[in-house]
């Protein structure tokens, strides 16, 4: 009977803990953030994000299983009173997040050693290769600029990039160890949530060339201030290999400020008197045509990518490609062949409707750009969004403003999740949007039902951002 009780408790506890463990993983194994989300009950309750059984997670689950099993053995073995046993088990159930935190810190020394081993190995592997190393950072536009640059450089070089949005220490490390072969160029996307994150990445990659895209209040919850974000992004130019060059997107105030302060070899883009910029821009729902000017030379280009942000990304990537010796005609050809990456202003058309999939975007600038793109289309316009998160103290004001901007373009609005519901609703109503044309969906099933009700032939649907499971 003792063993039956222990096994039953462990099974029930494992099922109960699933939401907490998944939230812990979604929060990047960050215990303070995990505990904060637990207190706010922002648990990964849905099925949009599944628990990923990485080697790290498997190690954690083994320790978590052993630790919780030991507690149930102690309770069942030493406590005879059934009521005390129930009370002790209830306490363990209530403090599952605490047990997760304890197991996290028990594993920290091991995880640290494993991480250092792989980082050291990746640094050694990359250091032995005589290739062009490029780092790209910024609050917005990193992934798009990386993909555009890789496409252009591919005309002349064999290029390896960090996949998708792998932009952390271990993400870059994995890219080096798993993907790097006989390549001529390695492009590393560099992300950050804390000061010093970019510097750590530069120590792995040791980039000779760099691109700084746009800077804004992304991850303001962890950075606290825009100044901290600027200082962190500035870690890339400050840690370039001697003799390298840095390309700055001059369309952004913070980036422009860092350009002016940088003392090394530098190039400014997206400014009329800069090294590279676009002029005579003409846009439609099918793409953009513009004159690309690099070092005084003009090129007529066409791209299927939509939005001014993408034009800025193209200009910035083209500038570095030109610096690295790519011919003008190859730059023009590469730009023409660009296709939108999945879920980033990706246009999906069928005979009944057009979908603008921008679900991987999660920032203010990108959301505004997506709405600008939507405005170019004809037909009934439907916007599906949960709003933006990780905005810190600006959460309410950012989403209130976003609600108003959506109202200026959309015919119908579907608000997903609860986290920004009232802010988006208030913002839309403040712009005189008909409240009867605003719908709410807490699940994808409900969202689909509403869309089926609203869709007519020729309509355009914008999916703007998609939150992980730990946001209701």
Image (spheres, helix red, strand yellow):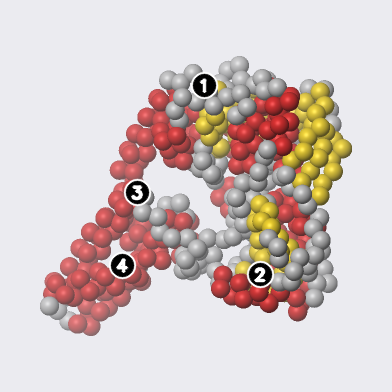
| Residue visible at 53% across and 44% down in the picture | 164
| Residue visible at 57% across and 24% down in the picture | 157
| Residue visible at 85% across and 35% down in the picture | 279
From the top left corner, tell me how far across and down residue 32 is, in percent.
Answer: 45, 55
Residue 415's disc number: 2
148, above or below 182, in the image: below
Quarter of the rendering occupied by the C terminus: bottom right
Residue toward you, 222 or 157: 157
Quarter of the rendering occupied by the N terminus: bottom left
Q: Are marks 3 and 4 in contact (CB under 8 Å)?
A: no
Distance between the Cα atoms at labels 4 and 1? Answer: 48 Å
146, above or below 417, in the image: above
Distance between the Cα atoms at labels 2 and 4? Answer: 33 Å
Residue designated by label 3 = 56
Residue toward you, 415 or 380: 380
262, above or below 32, in the image: above
Q: Earlier in the sequence, mark 4 or mark 1?
A: 4
Distance between the Cα atoms at labels 3 and 1? Answer: 31 Å
């Amino acid at each position: 009977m003792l063993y039956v009780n222990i096994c039953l408790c462990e099974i029930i506890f494992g099922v109960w803990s699933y939401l907490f463990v998944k939230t812990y993983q979604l929060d990047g194994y960050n215990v303070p953030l995990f505990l904060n989300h637990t207190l706010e009950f922002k648990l990964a309750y849905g099925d949009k994000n599944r628990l990923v059984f990485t080697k790290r997670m498997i190690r954690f689950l083994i320790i978590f299983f052993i630790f919780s099993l030991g507690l149930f053995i102690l309770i069942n073995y030493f406590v005879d009173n059934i009521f005390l046993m129930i009370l002790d088990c209830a306490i363990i159930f209530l403090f599952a997040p605490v047990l997760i935190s304890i197991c996290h810190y028990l594993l920290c020394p091991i995880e640290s050693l494993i991480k250092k081993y792989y980082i050291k190995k990746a640094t050694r592997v990359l250091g032995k290769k005589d290739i062009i190393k490029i780092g790209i950072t910024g609050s917005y536009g990193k992934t798009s600029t990386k993909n555009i640059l890789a496409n252009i450089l591919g005309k002349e070089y064999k290029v390896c990039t960090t996949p998708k949005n792998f932009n952390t220490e271990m993400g870059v490390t994995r890219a080096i160890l798993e993907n790097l072969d006989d390549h001529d160029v390695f492009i590393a996307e560099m992300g950050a949530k804390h000061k010093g994150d970019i510097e750590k990445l530069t120590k792995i990659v040791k980039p000779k060339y760099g691109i700084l895209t746009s800077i804004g209040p992304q991850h303001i919850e962890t950075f606290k201030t825009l100044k901290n974000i600027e200082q962190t992004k500035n870690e890339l130019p400050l840690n370039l290999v001697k003799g390298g060059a840095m390309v700055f997107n001059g369309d952004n105030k913070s980036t422009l400020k860092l350009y002016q302060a940088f003392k090394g070899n530098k190039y400014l883009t997206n400014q009329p008197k800069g090294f590279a910029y676009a002029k005579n821009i003409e846009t439609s729902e099918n793409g953009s045509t513009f004159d690309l000017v690099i070092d005084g030379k003009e090129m007529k280009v066409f791209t299927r990518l939509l939005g001014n942000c993408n034009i800025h990304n193209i200009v910035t990537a083209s500038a570095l490609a030109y610096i690295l010796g790519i011919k003008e005609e190859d730059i023009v050809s590469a730009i023409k062949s660009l296709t939108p990456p999945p879920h980033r202003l990706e246009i999906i058309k069928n005979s009944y409707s057009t979908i603008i999939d921008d679900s991987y975007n999660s920032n203010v600038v990108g959301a505004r750009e997506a709405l600008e793109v939507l405005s170019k289309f004809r037909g009934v316009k439907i916007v599906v969004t949960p709003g933006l998160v990780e905005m810190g103290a600006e959460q309410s004001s950012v989403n209130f403003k976003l609600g108003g901007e959506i109202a200026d373009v959309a015919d119908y609005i579907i608000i997903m999740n609860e986290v920004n519901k009232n802010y988006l609703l208030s913002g839309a109503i403040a712009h005189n949007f008909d409240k009867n044309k605003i719908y709410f969906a807490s699940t994808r099933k409900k969202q689909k039902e509403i869309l089926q009700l609203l869709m007519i032939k020729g309509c355009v649907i914008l999916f703007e951002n998609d939150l992980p499971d730990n946001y209701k």
